[in-house]
Amino acid sequence: MPAPTPENSTDDSSPPFEIRPAGRVLRLPPYLFGRINQVLYNKRRAGDDVIDLGMGNPSDPPEDLVIEKLAEAALDPRNHGYSKSNGILNLRREVSSKYLKKYGVRLDPEREVMVCLGSKEGFSHMCLAMMGAGDTAIVPAPYFPVHTHAVMLAAGNVISLDVADNEQFLSNIAYTCQNLYPKPKLLVCCYPHNPSTVTVEPEFYVELVKLAKRYGFMVISDFAYADVAFDGYQPPSFLAAPGAHEVGVEFTTMSKGYNMAGWRVGFCAGNAKMIEALGIIKGYFDYGMFLPVQISAILALRHTEAAVEAQSRKYQVRRDALCDGLNRIGWDITPPKAGMFVWAKIPEPWASRMDSIEFATKLLEQGDVAVSPGSGFGPSGEGFLRLALVENEARLRQAVRQIDRCLSGG
Ligand SMILES: Cc1ncc(COP(=O)(O)O)c(C=O)c1O
Protein backbone atom coordinates (compact mmCIF):
# COMPACT_ATOMS: atom_id res chain seq x y z
CA MET A 1 0.00 0.00 0.00
CA PRO A 2 1.48 3.37 -0.94
CA ALA A 3 2.37 5.75 1.89
CA PRO A 4 -0.27 8.48 2.31
CA THR A 5 0.65 11.69 0.55
CA PRO A 6 -1.30 14.93 0.43
CA GLU A 7 -2.70 13.76 -2.95
CA ASN A 8 -4.04 10.32 -1.93
CA SER A 9 -4.83 10.98 1.75
CA THR A 10 -8.40 10.12 2.73
CA ASP A 11 -8.04 11.45 6.26
CA ASP A 12 -10.10 14.66 6.16
CA SER A 13 -8.92 15.67 9.63
CA SER A 14 -5.27 16.11 8.68
CA PRO A 15 -4.54 19.38 6.91
CA PRO A 16 -3.12 18.95 3.39
CA PHE A 17 -0.32 21.42 4.13
CA GLU A 18 0.68 23.86 6.82
CA ILE A 19 -1.07 27.22 6.68
CA ARG A 20 1.64 29.72 7.55
CA PRO A 21 0.80 33.39 8.05
CA ALA A 22 3.27 35.90 6.64
CA GLY A 23 6.31 36.96 8.62
CA ARG A 24 4.72 40.34 9.31
CA VAL A 25 1.97 38.59 11.28
CA LEU A 26 4.34 36.19 13.06
CA ARG A 27 6.57 39.12 14.09
CA LEU A 28 3.78 40.66 16.18
CA PRO A 29 4.15 40.16 19.94
CA PRO A 30 2.21 37.35 21.66
CA TYR A 31 -1.26 38.11 22.94
CA LEU A 32 -1.08 38.53 26.73
CA PHE A 33 -4.69 38.63 27.79
CA GLY A 34 -5.96 35.15 26.98
CA ARG A 35 -6.75 34.26 30.59
CA ILE A 36 -8.25 37.60 31.62
CA ASN A 37 -10.50 37.64 28.53
CA GLN A 38 -11.58 34.07 29.27
CA VAL A 39 -12.58 35.07 32.82
CA LEU A 40 -14.55 38.04 31.47
CA TYR A 41 -16.26 35.85 28.88
CA ASN A 42 -17.18 33.20 31.47
CA LYS A 43 -18.57 35.81 33.86
CA ARG A 44 -20.68 37.39 31.13
CA ARG A 45 -22.03 33.97 30.11
CA ALA A 46 -22.88 33.24 33.72
CA GLY A 47 -24.87 36.50 33.82
CA ASP A 48 -22.55 38.28 36.30
CA ASP A 49 -22.83 42.05 36.32
CA VAL A 50 -19.25 43.06 35.48
CA ILE A 51 -18.43 46.79 35.60
CA ASP A 52 -16.34 47.03 32.46
CA LEU A 53 -13.71 49.77 32.49
CA GLY A 54 -11.43 47.87 30.12
CA MET A 55 -11.84 49.54 26.77
CA GLY A 56 -12.25 53.20 25.78
CA ASN A 57 -15.49 52.40 24.02
CA PRO A 58 -18.00 55.23 24.61
CA SER A 59 -21.30 54.01 26.05
CA ASP A 60 -23.35 57.14 25.25
CA PRO A 61 -25.07 57.58 21.85
CA PRO A 62 -24.42 60.35 19.30
CA GLU A 63 -26.89 63.25 19.11
CA ASP A 64 -30.39 62.43 17.77
CA LEU A 65 -30.04 64.76 14.79
CA VAL A 66 -26.94 62.85 13.64
CA ILE A 67 -28.73 59.49 13.81
CA GLU A 68 -31.80 60.93 12.10
CA LYS A 69 -29.63 62.29 9.27
CA LEU A 70 -28.05 58.85 8.87
CA ALA A 71 -31.49 57.25 8.52
CA GLU A 72 -32.67 59.93 6.08
CA ALA A 73 -29.54 59.67 3.94
CA ALA A 74 -29.79 55.87 3.92
CA LEU A 75 -33.27 56.15 2.41
CA ASP A 76 -31.90 58.04 -0.58
CA PRO A 77 -31.12 55.49 -3.34
CA ARG A 78 -28.32 57.74 -4.65
CA ASN A 79 -26.25 57.19 -1.50
CA HIS A 80 -25.49 53.47 -1.83
CA GLY A 81 -22.72 53.30 -4.39
CA TYR A 82 -18.98 53.33 -3.84
CA SER A 83 -17.71 56.56 -2.41
CA LYS A 84 -14.23 58.11 -2.83
CA SER A 85 -11.48 56.65 -0.70
CA ASN A 86 -10.30 60.08 0.47
CA GLY A 87 -13.80 61.19 1.52
CA ILE A 88 -16.29 63.66 0.03
CA LEU A 89 -15.07 67.24 -0.33
CA ASN A 90 -17.78 68.74 1.89
CA LEU A 91 -16.69 66.58 4.82
CA ARG A 92 -13.04 67.53 4.27
CA ARG A 93 -14.15 71.20 4.13
CA GLU A 94 -15.93 70.77 7.47
CA VAL A 95 -12.77 69.38 9.03
CA SER A 96 -10.83 72.40 7.73
CA SER A 97 -13.42 74.75 9.25
CA LYS A 98 -13.17 73.04 12.61
CA TYR A 99 -9.36 73.33 12.58
CA LEU A 100 -9.59 77.02 11.70
CA LYS A 101 -12.24 77.78 14.33
CA LYS A 102 -10.76 75.72 17.15
CA TYR A 103 -6.99 75.94 16.56
CA GLY A 104 -6.48 78.80 14.09
CA VAL A 105 -4.98 76.27 11.63
CA ARG A 106 -5.57 76.77 7.88
CA LEU A 107 -5.89 73.56 5.85
CA ASP A 108 -6.53 73.10 2.15
CA PRO A 109 -9.39 70.55 2.11
CA GLU A 110 -8.32 69.33 -1.35
CA ARG A 111 -4.72 68.44 -0.49
CA GLU A 112 -4.30 68.59 3.27
CA VAL A 113 -7.28 66.64 4.63
CA MET A 114 -8.18 62.98 4.20
CA VAL A 115 -11.16 61.03 5.54
CA CYS A 116 -10.25 57.66 7.12
CA LEU A 117 -12.28 54.64 8.24
CA GLY A 118 -11.51 55.58 11.85
CA SER A 119 -8.19 57.13 12.80
CA LYS A 120 -6.74 53.68 13.54
CA GLU A 121 -7.14 52.65 9.91
CA GLY A 122 -5.62 55.94 8.77
CA PHE A 123 -2.71 55.70 11.19
CA SER A 124 -1.91 52.11 10.19
CA HIS A 125 -2.01 52.87 6.49
CA MET A 126 0.07 56.03 7.00
CA CYS A 127 2.75 53.82 8.57
CA LEU A 128 2.52 51.53 5.55
CA ALA A 129 2.82 54.55 3.27
CA MET A 130 5.86 55.99 5.05
CA MET A 131 7.78 53.13 6.65
CA GLY A 132 9.64 50.14 5.25
CA ALA A 133 12.34 47.63 6.10
CA GLY A 134 15.25 49.30 7.89
CA ASP A 135 13.26 52.42 8.86
CA THR A 136 12.86 53.30 12.54
CA ALA A 137 10.05 55.09 14.34
CA ILE A 138 10.13 56.63 17.81
CA VAL A 139 6.93 55.96 19.75
CA PRO A 140 5.91 57.01 23.27
CA ALA A 141 6.20 54.45 26.09
CA PRO A 142 3.94 53.10 27.47
CA TYR A 143 2.38 52.73 24.05
CA PHE A 144 -1.10 52.52 22.58
CA PRO A 145 -0.57 49.15 20.85
CA VAL A 146 -1.39 50.42 17.35
CA HIS A 147 1.46 52.94 17.53
CA THR A 148 3.98 50.13 17.74
CA HIS A 149 2.28 47.39 15.80
CA ALA A 150 1.42 49.48 12.74
CA VAL A 151 5.12 50.33 12.39
CA MET A 152 6.02 46.65 12.76
CA LEU A 153 3.41 45.61 10.20
CA ALA A 154 5.06 48.06 7.83
CA ALA A 155 8.36 46.20 8.45
CA GLY A 156 9.78 49.12 10.45
CA ASN A 157 11.64 49.08 13.77
CA VAL A 158 10.43 50.78 16.93
CA ILE A 159 12.27 52.68 19.64
CA SER A 160 10.00 53.58 22.54
CA LEU A 161 10.83 56.55 24.78
CA ASP A 162 9.29 57.25 28.18
CA VAL A 163 6.49 59.77 27.78
CA ALA A 164 6.00 60.68 31.46
CA ASP A 165 8.07 63.89 31.45
CA ASN A 166 7.72 66.24 28.47
CA GLU A 167 11.18 67.84 28.73
CA GLN A 168 12.85 64.46 29.14
CA PHE A 169 10.91 63.06 26.19
CA LEU A 170 12.15 65.88 23.95
CA SER A 171 15.75 65.51 25.09
CA ASN A 172 15.58 61.72 24.64
CA ILE A 173 14.38 62.28 21.07
CA ALA A 174 17.37 64.54 20.39
CA TYR A 175 19.75 62.03 22.00
CA THR A 176 18.30 59.16 19.94
CA CYS A 177 18.61 61.14 16.72
CA GLN A 178 22.22 62.04 17.52
CA ASN A 179 23.21 58.46 18.30
CA LEU A 180 21.16 56.18 16.10
CA TYR A 181 22.20 55.33 12.59
CA PRO A 182 20.27 55.37 10.30
CA LYS A 183 18.39 58.19 12.06
CA PRO A 184 14.73 57.69 12.98
CA LYS A 185 12.46 58.44 10.06
CA LEU A 186 9.25 59.01 11.99
CA LEU A 187 8.07 60.10 15.41
CA VAL A 188 4.65 59.22 16.78
CA CYS A 189 3.22 61.46 19.48
CA CYS A 190 -0.13 61.30 21.20
CA TYR A 191 -1.43 63.97 23.57
CA PRO A 192 -3.63 63.65 25.59
CA HIS A 193 -1.75 60.38 25.80
CA ASN A 194 -3.38 56.98 25.92
CA PRO A 195 -2.74 55.24 28.29
CA SER A 196 -0.66 57.52 30.57
CA THR A 197 -2.95 60.62 30.24
CA VAL A 198 0.11 62.91 29.93
CA THR A 199 -0.76 66.24 28.28
CA VAL A 200 1.28 69.05 26.71
CA GLU A 201 1.08 72.81 26.17
CA PRO A 202 1.53 74.43 22.73
CA GLU A 203 5.25 75.19 23.35
CA PHE A 204 5.94 71.45 23.38
CA TYR A 205 4.99 71.19 19.71
CA VAL A 206 7.09 74.25 18.83
CA GLU A 207 10.13 72.41 20.21
CA LEU A 208 9.10 69.14 18.56
CA VAL A 209 8.85 70.76 15.12
CA LYS A 210 12.32 72.30 15.63
CA LEU A 211 13.71 68.84 16.42
CA ALA A 212 11.93 67.29 13.43
CA LYS A 213 13.50 69.88 11.14
CA ARG A 214 16.95 69.59 12.72
CA TYR A 215 17.10 65.79 12.55
CA GLY A 216 14.87 65.19 9.54
CA PHE A 217 12.09 62.99 10.95
CA MET A 218 8.40 63.09 10.09
CA VAL A 219 5.78 63.45 12.81
CA ILE A 220 2.44 61.73 13.21
CA SER A 221 0.35 63.27 15.96
CA ASP A 222 -2.45 61.01 17.18
CA PHE A 223 -4.97 63.53 18.54
CA ALA A 224 -7.73 61.02 19.37
CA TYR A 225 -8.67 62.80 22.63
CA ALA A 226 -8.75 66.33 21.18
CA ASP A 227 -12.36 66.79 22.28
CA VAL A 228 -12.26 65.34 25.80
CA ALA A 229 -10.67 67.74 28.30
CA PHE A 230 -11.41 68.99 31.80
CA ASP A 231 -11.20 72.02 34.08
CA GLY A 232 -10.86 74.46 31.16
CA TYR A 233 -7.78 72.73 29.69
CA GLN A 234 -7.69 72.84 25.87
CA PRO A 235 -5.45 70.16 24.31
CA PRO A 236 -3.32 71.90 21.67
CA SER A 237 -3.08 70.75 18.08
CA PHE A 238 0.34 69.79 16.75
CA LEU A 239 -0.61 71.52 13.48
CA ALA A 240 -0.84 74.90 15.25
CA ALA A 241 2.95 74.91 15.80
CA PRO A 242 4.87 76.99 13.24
CA GLY A 243 6.15 74.78 10.43
CA ALA A 244 4.21 71.67 11.56
CA HIS A 245 2.69 71.25 8.07
CA GLU A 246 6.20 70.89 6.65
CA VAL A 247 7.05 67.89 8.81
CA GLY A 248 3.92 65.98 9.72
CA VAL A 249 0.26 65.15 9.98
CA GLU A 250 -2.33 64.83 12.70
CA PHE A 251 -5.10 62.26 13.13
CA THR A 252 -8.42 63.16 14.75
CA THR A 253 -11.54 61.08 15.24
CA MET A 254 -15.27 61.29 15.85
CA SER A 255 -15.12 58.14 18.00
CA LYS A 256 -14.60 59.77 21.37
CA GLY A 257 -16.03 63.31 21.71
CA TYR A 258 -18.93 62.61 19.33
CA ASN A 259 -19.70 59.10 20.65
CA MET A 260 -19.40 57.67 17.12
CA ALA A 261 -16.82 54.93 17.71
CA GLY A 262 -18.72 52.29 15.73
CA TRP A 263 -19.23 54.63 12.78
CA ARG A 264 -15.51 54.60 11.98
CA VAL A 265 -14.97 58.24 11.10
CA GLY A 266 -11.45 59.65 11.41
CA PHE A 267 -9.38 62.29 9.68
CA CYS A 268 -5.80 62.91 8.70
CA ALA A 269 -4.70 66.52 8.24
CA GLY A 270 -1.45 68.34 7.53
CA ASN A 271 1.49 67.63 5.22
CA ALA A 272 0.20 67.30 1.66
CA LYS A 273 2.91 64.86 0.56
CA MET A 274 2.23 62.47 3.41
CA ILE A 275 -1.50 62.72 2.76
CA GLU A 276 -0.97 62.05 -0.93
CA ALA A 277 1.01 58.89 -0.07
CA LEU A 278 -1.73 57.78 2.35
CA GLY A 279 -4.28 58.38 -0.41
CA ILE A 280 -2.34 56.14 -2.81
CA ILE A 281 -2.25 53.29 -0.26
CA LYS A 282 -5.90 53.75 0.69
CA GLY A 283 -6.88 53.75 -2.96
CA TYR A 284 -5.71 50.12 -3.11
CA PHE A 285 -7.36 49.06 0.15
CA ASP A 286 -10.79 50.68 0.30
CA TYR A 287 -13.53 52.40 -1.65
CA GLY A 288 -14.28 55.03 0.94
CA MET A 289 -16.84 55.47 3.66
CA PHE A 290 -20.59 54.82 3.32
CA LEU A 291 -22.02 58.13 2.05
CA PRO A 292 -24.79 58.46 4.67
CA VAL A 293 -22.10 58.21 7.38
CA GLN A 294 -20.11 61.01 5.74
CA ILE A 295 -23.22 63.19 5.34
CA SER A 296 -24.19 62.71 9.01
CA ALA A 297 -20.59 63.37 10.09
CA ILE A 298 -20.77 66.77 8.36
CA LEU A 299 -23.89 67.57 10.36
CA ALA A 300 -22.29 66.40 13.61
CA LEU A 301 -19.21 68.57 13.04
CA ARG A 302 -21.32 71.57 12.08
CA HIS A 303 -24.05 71.43 14.72
CA THR A 304 -23.11 69.38 17.78
CA GLU A 305 -20.15 71.21 19.32
CA ALA A 306 -22.25 71.97 22.43
CA ALA A 307 -22.96 68.25 22.87
CA VAL A 308 -19.25 67.47 22.55
CA GLU A 309 -18.52 69.94 25.34
CA ALA A 310 -21.33 68.46 27.46
CA GLN A 311 -19.85 65.01 26.93
CA SER A 312 -16.49 66.26 28.24
CA ARG A 313 -18.21 67.57 31.37
CA LYS A 314 -19.78 64.12 31.81
CA TYR A 315 -16.33 62.51 31.65
CA GLN A 316 -15.07 65.08 34.14
CA VAL A 317 -17.78 64.11 36.65
CA ARG A 318 -16.89 60.45 36.13
CA ARG A 319 -13.17 61.21 36.50
CA ASP A 320 -13.87 62.90 39.84
CA ALA A 321 -16.04 60.03 41.07
CA LEU A 322 -13.40 57.43 40.20
CA CYS A 323 -10.29 59.36 41.30
CA ASP A 324 -11.83 60.60 44.58
CA GLY A 325 -13.09 57.10 45.33
CA LEU A 326 -9.76 55.38 44.64
CA ASN A 327 -7.82 58.00 46.62
CA ARG A 328 -10.25 57.51 49.50
CA ILE A 329 -9.44 53.78 49.62
CA GLY A 330 -5.72 54.53 49.74
CA TRP A 331 -4.61 54.58 46.09
CA ASP A 332 -2.42 57.41 44.85
CA ILE A 333 -4.15 58.78 41.76
CA THR A 334 -3.38 61.99 39.88
CA PRO A 335 -6.60 63.02 38.13
CA PRO A 336 -6.07 63.40 34.36
CA LYS A 337 -6.56 66.78 32.64
CA ALA A 338 -8.00 65.15 29.53
CA GLY A 339 -8.90 61.88 27.81
CA MET A 340 -11.14 58.99 28.74
CA PHE A 341 -8.89 57.15 31.16
CA VAL A 342 -7.42 57.06 34.63
CA TRP A 343 -3.86 55.69 34.73
CA ALA A 344 -3.51 54.18 38.19
CA LYS A 345 -0.38 52.99 39.95
CA ILE A 346 -1.10 49.62 41.57
CA PRO A 347 -1.01 50.24 45.34
CA GLU A 348 1.11 48.38 47.85
CA PRO A 349 1.21 45.67 49.07
CA TRP A 350 -0.23 44.39 45.79
CA ALA A 351 2.40 45.98 43.55
CA SER A 352 5.15 43.98 45.27
CA ARG A 353 3.13 40.77 45.23
CA MET A 354 1.81 40.52 41.69
CA ASP A 355 2.12 41.94 38.18
CA SER A 356 -0.55 44.01 36.47
CA ILE A 357 -2.15 41.06 34.67
CA GLU A 358 -2.48 39.11 37.93
CA PHE A 359 -3.84 42.17 39.74
CA ALA A 360 -6.37 42.96 36.99
CA THR A 361 -7.44 39.30 36.99
CA LYS A 362 -7.96 39.45 40.75
CA LEU A 363 -10.15 42.58 40.44
CA LEU A 364 -12.18 40.84 37.76
CA GLU A 365 -12.49 37.43 39.43
CA GLN A 366 -13.14 38.67 42.96
CA GLY A 367 -14.47 42.20 42.43
CA ASP A 368 -16.40 41.97 39.14
CA VAL A 369 -14.53 45.01 37.80
CA ALA A 370 -12.72 44.76 34.44
CA VAL A 371 -9.72 47.04 33.82
CA SER A 372 -6.76 46.99 31.41
CA PRO A 373 -3.45 45.78 32.89
CA GLY A 374 -0.64 48.26 32.27
CA SER A 375 1.63 45.65 30.67
CA GLY A 376 -0.78 45.56 27.72
CA PHE A 377 0.83 48.89 26.79
CA GLY A 378 4.39 47.54 26.84
CA PRO A 379 6.90 46.83 29.60
CA SER A 380 6.87 50.41 30.89
CA GLY A 381 3.15 50.05 31.66
CA GLU A 382 3.91 47.34 34.23
CA GLY A 383 2.82 48.34 37.73
CA PHE A 384 -0.17 50.31 36.40
CA LEU A 385 -3.80 49.80 35.42
CA ARG A 386 -5.84 51.75 32.90
CA LEU A 387 -9.46 52.39 33.84
CA ALA A 388 -11.81 53.78 31.16
CA LEU A 389 -14.47 56.33 32.16
CA VAL A 390 -17.14 54.55 30.14
CA GLU A 391 -19.61 53.72 32.91
CA ASN A 392 -21.81 56.28 34.65
CA GLU A 393 -20.97 57.98 37.94
CA ALA A 394 -23.04 55.61 40.11
CA ARG A 395 -21.44 52.55 38.49
CA LEU A 396 -17.96 54.03 38.97
CA ARG A 397 -18.66 54.59 42.69
CA GLN A 398 -19.92 51.01 42.83
CA ALA A 399 -16.72 49.84 41.09
CA VAL A 400 -14.62 51.52 43.81
CA ARG A 401 -16.67 49.79 46.55
CA GLN A 402 -16.22 46.44 44.81
CA ILE A 403 -12.47 46.99 44.41
CA ASP A 404 -12.19 47.98 48.08
CA ARG A 405 -14.12 44.89 49.19
CA CYS A 406 -12.07 42.61 46.94
CA LEU A 407 -8.75 43.95 48.26
CA SER A 408 -9.85 44.07 51.90
CA GLY A 409 -10.76 40.40 51.62
CA GLY A 410 -7.05 39.57 51.16
C1 LIG B 1 -4.74 56.99 21.15
C2 LIG B 1 -5.78 56.43 20.24
N1 LIG B 1 -5.63 56.56 18.93
C3 LIG B 1 -6.53 56.05 18.06
C4 LIG B 1 -7.63 55.37 18.51
C5 LIG B 1 -8.56 54.79 17.51
O1 LIG B 1 -9.61 55.64 17.23
P1 LIG B 1 -10.59 55.39 16.02
O2 LIG B 1 -11.86 54.92 16.60
O3 LIG B 1 -10.72 56.73 15.36
O4 LIG B 1 -9.98 54.40 15.11
C6 LIG B 1 -7.84 55.20 19.87
C7 LIG B 1 -8.99 54.42 20.35
O5 LIG B 1 -9.07 53.93 21.42
C8 LIG B 1 -6.88 55.75 20.76
O6 LIG B 1 -7.01 55.59 22.08
Image (cartoon, grey):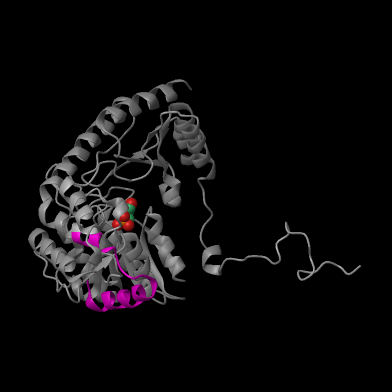
Q: Position of residue 255 (x, y in %)?
A: 27, 52
Q: Position of residue 386 (x, y in %)?
A: 36, 42
Check the image and report above or below for 211 versus 70: below
The answer to which quarter of the image holds residue 184 is bottom left
At a point 18% along the width and 65% down the height, the residue shown is 91
Whether residue 19 appears in this view of the structure is: yes
Q: Is residue 50 above or below residue 142?
A: above
Residue at the far right: name it.
Answer: 1
Horizontal and vertical percent for residue 407? 43, 25
Please tell me in which quadrant of the rendered image residue 322 appears.
top left
Q: Main secondary structure of the magenta part?
A: helix
Quadrant of picture, ligand 1: bottom left
Residue at screen point 31% across, 70% down: 82
Lateral position of residue 362 relative to residue 193, left or right: right
Q: In percent of the image, x 44 and y 52: which residue is there?
A: 378
Please state which of residues 266 and 47 is positioned toward the viewer in this rendering.
47
Query: Residue 195 location in percent, x, y?
Result: 34, 48
As drawn, is 85 to the left or to the right of 12?
Answer: left
Between 345 and 340, the one nearer to me in the picture? 340
In the rendered structure, does residue 273 fall within the stretch colored magenta? Answer: yes
Pick the residue in front: 332 or 344. 344
Q: Which residues are magenta?
A: 270-295
Q: Nearer the viewer, residue 199 or 132?
A: 132
